[in-house]
Image (cartoon, helix red, strand yellow):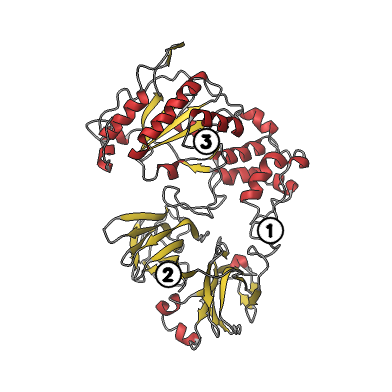
Amino acid sequence: MVSLALTAATLCTGLGDGTAARNEAPTVRGFLLESASGERVSLEEEQAGRVLTALVFLDVDDAVAQALAPRLAAGERQYRGQGVRFLAIDGDEDDSPERMRAFAAASGFEFPFLRDPFGAAAERAGATRSGEVVLLDGDLRVVYRGAADDQFEDGAARAAPSNDYLVDAIESALAGETIDPAVTETAGAPFARRDAKAARAITFHRDVAPILWNHCAECHRPGQIGPMSFLDADEAAGWAPTIAEVVAEGRMPPWHASPRHGRFVNERRLTETEKKTLELWASGGAKLGDPAGAPPRPVFADAEWRIGEPDRVIELPEEQTIPAEGVQPYRYVAFDPRFDEDFWVQSVEVRPTARGATHHVIAYLLPPGMSSKDALRNPQTILSLSALGGYAPGSDPMRLPDGQGFRVVKGSTLLFELHYTPTGKAATDRTRIGFRRSRVPITEVVETGAAMNFSFRIPPRATDATFQASHRFRAPASITTFTPHMHRRGKAFRYELERQDGTRQVLLDVPRYDFNWQHTYVLSRPVAASAGDTLRVTAVYDNSKANPFNPNPDTWVSWGDQTFEEMLIGYFDFVGTRK
């Protein structure tokens, strides 16, 4: 067995004496599936940082799969330390999670066994039979396809295999050698697809409600941003074709981070099975089914506030009038909320009343003794301030875990920054901010930092104008969230941590930035940064006619408040231990 420390160059020559053939190899598009144990597993996440991934398609009733499974388990244990990942995928829609778990336990699987009842992963990988293996390199290109071995061939079964095709392919790829053979025939049973039957059987209460209620209803319910309620079966059924369309196109649920870098607790992604269920429900007539088969309706902490009932609500002291048209400069409204003691905040929600005409709201905290005039002397001053809360299209409330919080100092005042974008119809706004104090002792203090670039200039008609900004940590920190911010020419955004030894780690990659959805990406696990490490952000802008949101492709663009100008801000939150 070859044991090597692998490099990117090794994989680039994995098919022989040149890279051209490798570059022409088909690429498998990523997928998200649920495992037999209920975990959500992404191909891109599993592949990140690995050199090879073996996708093995199985049907638990198939003799080929039953004979092959224990050898797969042994192979995975043998190669996991060399950067090789195994994913078993069940392509039979009749195999229940219970049967899959029993099969995996009997076979000794220590890797995910995924459900693919509608064949989405099999279709993307080009797999059609049980026992078929698709081996992928680090860029998800196919380097081997076929049987794992030759125990079953031409209708006959040997007592044991004489050729271990998968092992040979892995060894060759690890050694940077030609994989031969790169394609073999698979003897397993073909997967059957019964979409038409499934479409007739799918109902809202049994199949669709769990998806919409778990992933969509927080916004799609009365009083929230969604324009329709998915808590009501009849209303959801009326929107079934639209739901299927926007889900298939990736417009909903809104989420723009690449799954290859970072894992996030607030990720909004549906599995391929969930997407197909919505598609088949719509095509099958959006049947409602028996309400008795529905899961319990979701219970929300408060009908209006997503954070639950606030401890205190602060609203603008005066109603703001928004004209029907015209460029609106930023408005600043100072307000003394009379904070008469220090306290720790755990969750905050900002709710404009004229949501459609509100570009953003930030409620800056002015420390005691600082006036609004002091804060507004230059952009660097105000952007360096902490904020009680903020709002932008598509943003979520801030909800920190127990033990984390940010401090509001006694005597602090608020400075509301209000940016309105007229919609063609006059409106009024009286934004409110609700917050909840921490109920438990604070052990980790949350702070906000930003990597900003004020000096960039985007040329006319540029399609990929790229600029950077950075923040150097002066003390150890644990990074918890990212909020990239650009305007209408924003195309892509990336955060990387450069450590003092010169290594770099991509923490967040947003390949298709969408100005209409100002996400905060909350890491599943904080990333530790040492004193002297640098957080670098890279922003890409499209100032060409190909950008449908571009206000004017024939002009130079630089920093400015308005959406026809641009910004480059990489906000991030980090925590430190309370002293």
Kindly identify which residue carries mark 3: 114
Quarter of the C terminus within the rendering: bottom left
In the rendered image, the vertical position of residue 194 relative to residue 158, given as above or below: below
Q: In what element is the residue under mark 3? A: strand
Quadrant location of residue 469?
bottom left
Which residue is rendered at x = 68% and y = 54% of the image?
Answer: 228
Instruction: Give amino acid for label 3.
Output: Leu
Q: The disc labelled 1 sits on which kind of residue?
A: Phe
Please give the count of numbered marks on the rendered protein: 3
The reply to whether residue 26 is visible in this rendering is no
Contact between labelled residues 1 and 3, with CB atoms less than 8 Å apart: no
Choose top left, top right, bottom left or bottom right for residue 80. top left
351 up-or-down from 250: above or below: below
* Amino acid at the residue labelled 2: Gly
Q: Earlier in the sequence, mark 2 or mark 3?
A: 3
| Pointer 2 residue | 449
487 to the left or right of 12: right
Q: Nearer the viewer, residue 557 or 85?
A: 85
The residues tagged by marks 2 and 3 sit, at their Cα atoms, a distance apart of 39 Å
Between the residue at mark 1 and the residue at mark 2, the CA separation in whole angstroms equals: 31 Å
Q: Residue furthest left?
A: 17
Residue that badge 1 annotates: 300
Residue drawn where x is 58% and y is 26% of the image: 193
Looking at the image, tell me whether mark 3 or mark 1 is earlier in sequence order.
3
